[in-house]
Image: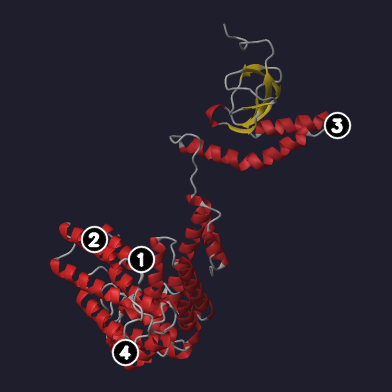
Amino acid sequence: MATEKWEKRICQLIKRLKSSSDEASFRNDFHDAVTRAIDQGKLTGTDADLLFEARSYLEGWTTSPAPDPLVAASQWMKIYEAGQNRIPETILEALLRRFPESPLNAEQLRTFVLQCSHPSLIEVLLDRRLVRSQHLNELTQTHPAEFYQSAAFDVMTERHALQGAGPLWEECARGKARPDGLMTRERAIVSVYASFPEDDGNERLVALLLAGAVNADGVLGALLNVEQAALRFCRYIAFGRSHESIEQISLNWIGRCQVEFQKGLGQKSQTVWLVLAMLRLSCLVQFEDRKRLTEQTAALSQHSILQVLQKMEEDCTSGVGDVPLVVLAKELHEAVQEHVRRLPTGTSRADDSPERALRFERYRGSKEVIEQILHAMEAPIEASALRDALEVSLFNCGVRPLGEAGEQVHFDVNVHEAETSAVLVGDAVVISHVGRSLGEGQERLVLRKAKVRPVRNHTECPGEN
């Protein structure tokens, strides 16, 4: 949601306040901004009173000497507890950035962090070193249930700083949803899984998925957002264990990958490709144990090839050309044949008949070979018989001359190439070197334009009156 004008104004005043500044001017400007917000219906009288109380605390925080840390912390907690659902988060963040440079004690830390639902405020605490990461990790051990519901969980996850998260795993397994606006339970499970040692984490996650107490599809989808965690778990279920229950997890994950492919080649695509490649490879080396999974991965792999070929046809510079695919030779052949069949066969006209479209495609297929013959004919040839034979061959392939040497025509940029500058469309020109086309009329495909030069002392082409 965009920050409103009155919010920005108050945040600016909070940021600019200095101990040496004119407090009277600050108070007047602050009062004016709050009053305008009330007049616009943005604030209630109770909200305004809370902001004025925060202003008085802020003035004390910027004085010298600094206020007692316990007193300042109590003032901040009073404002936050009363205003967390009433005062905009931007203003709360601006106030916290002006909090005195003194770390919070253990009790103050626990009280605020465990009830804070605004990640940006936890970010401020860490950035200003009012708290440290190790302090927050200690709370995962002493107060795991409250920490699981707090914004601190999200911030520590985003910073890859979560450690010793065993107690949090128990909270994840209990199935309690997390507050709105914070990461989902499924995403939280993936975060805690990623913080465990590899063997321990893999066993825990498999057990949780098989227990049926969690939305397995949601967890496997959330894994695709964290590449390293996804690849770690995929290696385990693909090559670490062989069991019917593990195959069911793999089948569910393939289904999730298919959903992502249907959405298009987005941000998750690289992870999805890697997961599919590892599961497919595991099927090829353990075919007898994973027949159902083999069928699923084979079908999705073949569909993936078509997606990649289509994307490369549209944009050969796209990164999709670097994705890993595990396919058999026959699957690749079939996919390429299907891709070729799907390619458009249009000509220069959208309403051409299928016969004319097919003929146009044959012309395009012959173009490269014919161009090479034309280059050979332009080189000095001793034997006129060879040249005559080549002419006949080209004619049989559908090659026709574009004009005749010495012929005077109107300049047409589609079939003519001027030997000099300043030749405009429609100007009278004379053909100096005959061009070549494949086919005639509207169906023709120009192979080599006829070279022309301006007609001297003529204003019209022959035949015009």
Of the pair 41 and 319, the residue shown nearer to us: 41
Kindly report the distance in space between the C-alpha atoms of the residues bearing marks 3 and 4.
Answer: 93 Å
Checking the image for residue 382, the label placed there is: 3
Q: What separation in Å lies between label 3 and label 1 (alpha carbons)?
A: 90 Å
Q: Amino acid at mark 2?
A: Ala
Image vertical order of residue 234 relative to residue 163, above or below? above
Element type at mark 1: helix
Q: Which residue is mark 2?
A: 33
Q: Quadrant of residue 131?
A: bottom left
Q: Which residue is mark 1?
A: 16
Label 3 is placed on what type of residue? Glu
Quadrant of the image occupied by residue 464: top right
* Element under disc 3: loop
Numbered mark located on residue 144 in the image: 4
**Amino acid type at mark 1:** Arg
Q: Position of residue 319 (x, y in %)?
A: 53, 60
Q: Quadrant of the C terminus?
A: top right
**Among the two numbered marks 1 and 2 on one chain, the one whose residue lies closer to the N terminus:** 1
Give the SS element for disc 2: helix
- Label 4 crowd (10 A; few <14 / some 14-19 / many >=20): many
Q: Are marks 2 and 4 in contact (CB under 8 Å)?
A: no
